[in-house]
Structure formats: structure tokens, C-alpha cells
Amino acid sequence: MYNIGVIGTGYVGLVQGVIMAEFGMNVICMDVVSEKIEKLKKGILPIYEPGLKELLDKNVTSGRLHFLTDIQETVEKSDVIFIAVGTPPQDDGSADLQYVQAVAKSIGKYMNGYKIIVDKSTVPVGTGKIVRDIVQEELDRRGGNFEFDIVSNPEFLREGKAVRDCLTPDRVVIGAESEKAVDIMKKVYDVLYINQTPFLITNLETAEMIKYASNAFLAVKISFINEMALLADKVGANIQEIARGMGMDGRISPKFLHAGPGYGGSCFPKDTKAIADIAHQYDEQLLVIEAAIKANEKQKRKMSERIISTVSQEVPLEHATFAIWGLSFKPETDDMRDAPSIDIIRALVSVGAKIRAYCPEGLKEAKWRLKDIEDSMTYCRNEYEAAEGADAIILLTEWHQFRGAYLNKVKDVMKNDYFFDLRNVFSKNIEVKKIFKYSGVGC
Ligand code: NAI
């Protein structure tokens, strides 16, 4: 079997490394952040991801999973090296490739034999070849004469379900330039996927583009249903029934047809902007995707405008308090990157309102992301504490525990009785409409 190195121990790298160790492979997870690596060695996770802690502990104890900050040792000891560093957006929307390039340079510098270099980060089309050139340049500089292959193997895991997605992915995409690389990648993945997971073997460029095309398509779907929800509100239709009716058509599918406050997270916002930017570089314009990006910004704006215009009819905004239920961009994660809660909270604070916020996992990250408005923020221990003295509840992330909230108990501690359910969690609950001035998104 092959020794695996994973460079970049974030959401993707860590989950990937842990799962490969779980299936018996020797894995080194490497990161430049020594604090993160030290904590991982002690079994402390840097992220919240259901099911990951147990697997981490088990595989560290087994001696198969190692954490290092030393890239030389990682490269030297690994046959297959996964690059899983961040590719954050730059101001113009393009992906920042500096971390990928830095890793490529180090691999070239420390290579000591044949290696497969696998790009797992989401990267613009053409990056595989850039990585190959950087590695080769570094080898030439040091007079190293080793063969290597570049593979593009994009990751499709969903935060909050990352362990499950890594264990049972819908597909494994492998973009490669040689049969040898394909064979080795298949052997690595065959160990993991005894369940007939489909493999799609392509060239590098196609694999790189599949990832962006997939995320952009999902983002378009979300923006589409959000636009339908805005219209449904105006014409008295119900978006959940509309989505159900649409989703019964096998060509459409019911997935990703949930109206809400706009998409967020570490992938959709950045990947839609990045693919639009790639198109510009090739003198093309992706009109549908650009519209989805604009619609998403509009959706977040519309949500805060609606809240402000409704509540201000009764309460001067400088005296208004909003209870936020859920901060992370979706449930079962502590990830706050580009979460719609950030924009909506900022809009409310900008008109003078105070915020009482609760999230099962997102509080820590919210505190530093919203540091500049900390005077307007109170962070609470649960949804009931957040509701104390509030004029309105704004449900922003559909954590399971909110579904079972004792609504009378919530109402009793509030000053006013508005309930903005931006995930339509209570849309079919008759009680909530009796207790609160309730509004959902498109229903
Ligand atoms: P992350 O920010 O959680 O982790 C990246 C890690 O790379 C950090 O721990 C950072 O310290 C480390 N790093 C940066 N430079 C390094 C270097 N030179 N050597 C070693 N480590 C280095 O990022 P995340 O979310 O894991 O994403 C990684 C890539 O995977 C991105 O391209 C992202 O778009 C993609 N992706 C992310 C998914 C997600 O749900 N988070 C899903 C699918 C793909």
C-alpha cells in the first residue's frame, strides 16, 4: 500500500487524512500552523465536524495517523501527496493560488523519488499544469531527476456531513495525465470504496472544471428558488409547495430547492466568483452564474430590509433587539465563512439595533468575525437566553434543536413577538403563527 501525505490540515485535508488512516493507510497530515498540529496530536479538533473526533482518536492511537509541521519529512515519506490548502478569493474574485504554489515548490525541493501529486484544493482550470511546472522548475534547480505525476482529484464533501461524504461519495473524479497515475489513484481509492463508487477519469482540465461547474450549478439552483420565494411572497403562493411540485420532476430533483437567506460558506461564494473570473480571462462571460451571484447578494439584502421595515413600524430601531438563532452558514458546522448571518447582523446593527446571538457551534468564530461591532452584540448560552428582551427572533441556521423549542417559553421572555424564520423551519407549525407575528421565506 502507499504512504499518504496530506498537505493542509483544514476541513478537507483533515477529514481526508483521517478517513484514509481509518482504512489502514499510513497517513501524515501536515500543516504550517503548529498550534493546530499540536492540538491534533492531543486529539483536539480545530473544527466541529460530527463523527470526526472518534475517528481521529482511534487512528492516532493506532499509529497510522501522524501530524507534522515538517513539509520535508512529509514529502520524503509519502508516495501520494494530496494538496489540500486553502484557495481563498482575492478582491477581484479570482482564486488566490499562493498556498498551492508554495506547496508545489516545497514538493519539488524535497522530492526523493516518484511521487503522485494530487490537487484536492478547488483550483482554476490550468492549475495542475502550473503545479507541474513549479515542481519541475524546482527539481531542475537542484538537479533532481525524479519522475512525478500530477492528478486533479476535486473534493465534494459537505461540511457537517464531511465524514459521511468522504466515506460514501457520489463519485470520485480523477483527472490525470498518465495510466500509471490513474492506476495508483484507483488503488488508493479502492481501499476506501468497496461500495461501487463511480470513478470518472478525465484529463486535468476537465476534473478541475467539474468542481467549479458543480458548485456553480448548486449556487444557481439556490438563487433560483430564492427568487421564486420573493415572487411567491408577493403573489400569495407557497414556495415549499412550489419546490415540492418542481422537485417531483426527475429532471429537476427536490435537492437544493430550499428557499432561505442566501447561500454562504467557504465554497459557493468563492467558487462562483472564481469561475466567473476564469471565464473573463478567456474572454467569456458566464451570465447565468453572474446573475446567481447578484441574486444571492440581493437575497441577503432583502431579508434584512424586510426585517427592518416590519419591526420599525412598531419599534424604533435604535431601541430594537434581535435574537439570532444560528450563526454558522449551515447546521452541524462551526464554519462562519461568508455566512449570511454576518451580512444580516451587520445590516441590523447599522440601523442602531442590538443583537442577542446564539449558535450551538458558531459562537467562537462569530466573536472574532464580528469583533468590530462587539458593543452591539451579546452572545448567549442558548436560544431562550437569546430571546430574553428581544423584539424579534431571526432563525438563520436550521440547527435541529430549534425545531423542538418551547415556543411559549420563548415568547414569555421576549419584549415583542416577531418571528422571522429565514429557513422555513416552522412554516407548517400552526402554533408558531398563533404565538408570533410569523414570517418565513416565500411562505
Ligand atoms: P482550510 O482553510 O480549512 O484549510 C486549509 C489549511 O491549509 C489550513 O489549515 C492552512 O493552515 C493550511 N496551509 C496553508 N498553507 C499551507 C502550506 N504551505 N503548507 C501546509 N499547510 C498549509 O480550507 P478547507 O476548507 O479545507 O479548503 C481547502 C480546499 O478545499 C479549498 O480549495 C476549498 O475550496 C476546497 N474545498 C473545501 C470544502 C469545504 O467544505 N471546506 C469542500 C470541498 C473543497
Image (cartoon, grey):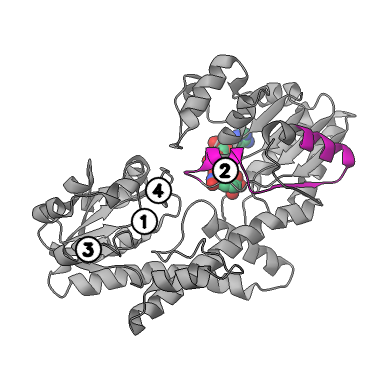
> In the structure shown, which secondary structural element does the residue marked by tag 3 occupy?
strand
Which percent across, then down, holds residue 282?
Answer: 74, 68
Residue 404 within the segment the image draws in magenta: no
Task: Estimate the x, y position of residue 352 in percent, counting from the top left.
Answer: 20, 63
Circle nearer the viewer, 1 or 4: 4
The residue pinned by badge 2 equals 165
Lower position in the chain sequence, tag 3 or tag 2: 2
**Regarding mark 4 in the picture, which secondary structure is present there?**
loop
From the image, state whether disc 2 or disc 1 is nearer to you: 2
Which amino acid does the dot numbered 4 rest on?
A: Pro
Residue 331's disc is: 4
Q: Earlier in the sequence, mark 2 or mark 1?
A: 2
Q: Name the N-terminal-most of marks 1 and 4.
A: 4
Judging from the image, what secondary structure is the residue with disc 2 in? helix
Q: Which residues are magenta?
A: 159-187
Residue under label 1: 342
Q: Hey, which quadrant is residue 381 in on the image?
A: top left
